[in-house]
Amino acid sequence: VKVLPFYLFTLLPLLASCDDYLDTNNERIVPAHEELSSLEALQAATAGLYAQPWYYFLKQRFISLGDARANNLYISNSTLGEVNAQATLNEEKQNASIQYSWASLYNVITQASYIINDYAPYCIENGVCSEADANACMGEARFMRALAYWYLAMYWHDVPIVDDPVTMSA
């Protein structure tokens, strides 16, 4: 019976102070709109679509998903099991190539959608750049998003279409 007041008085201040502890400002992350102060910043955000988001899809998965499934690779007994499994169409759904490829392609779609739905319209509304320049960036982003959907549809056929990642996560 005497232990209960001890725990109550010990844990109560800890629970009351959680809100103050959890409310912090991350000084390393700058909101995207604060970075969009010039056409070069919008073009840099668009240029990012050409590299990092595609990494896990293009690293080895592109070859193993495409050429291995098409029987366009020499498969020997010494070939790694993942490529061999894809060449013989005996892969499991937990296969790293499948998971990383799927996530990488949706990463491209998400980043392209941010440019199309948020960054470029923000730049037009706030006079950061001309409408023609913003439309050029939106066109690049639409192409990258369409290319990612093309790969998804080619490998997995019916896939979810995400036009606005902000409303999908809410």
Image (cartoon, grey):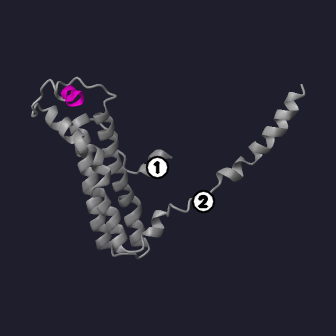
134 left or right, relative to 18? left
Q: Main secondary structure of the magenta part?
A: helix
Callout 2, which amino acid? Answer: Asn
Q: Quadrant of the N terminus?
A: top right
The local crowd at label 1, few if under 14, some if 14 to 19, many if 20 or more residues have their Cα within 10 Å, is: few
The residue at the point 35 percent across, 63 percent down is: 45
Place of residue 28 in the rendered image (x, y in percent of width and height, measured from the top left): 51, 61
Question: Which label's residue is closer to the chain start, 1 or 2?
Answer: 2
* Residue where numbered disc 2 is placed: 25
Callout 1, which amino acid? Answer: Thr
The residue at the point 29 percent across, 40 percent down is: 101
- The vertical placement of 67 against 146, above or below, is above
Residue 57 quadrant: top left
Tell me the magenta residue range. 80-86
* Residue where numbered disc 1 is placed: 167
In whole angstroms, how far apart are the C-alphas of marks 1 and 2?
Answer: 24 Å
The residue at the point 65 percent across, 50 percent down is: 22
Q: Which label belongs to residue 58?
A: none
Place of residue 90 in the rendered image (x, y in percent of width and height, measured from the top left): 22, 23
- The vertical placement of 133 against 23, above or below, is below
76 left or right, relative to 133? left
The local crowd at label 2, few if under 14, some if 14 to 19, many if 20 or more residues have their Cα within 10 Å, is: few
Under circle 1, the secondary element is helix
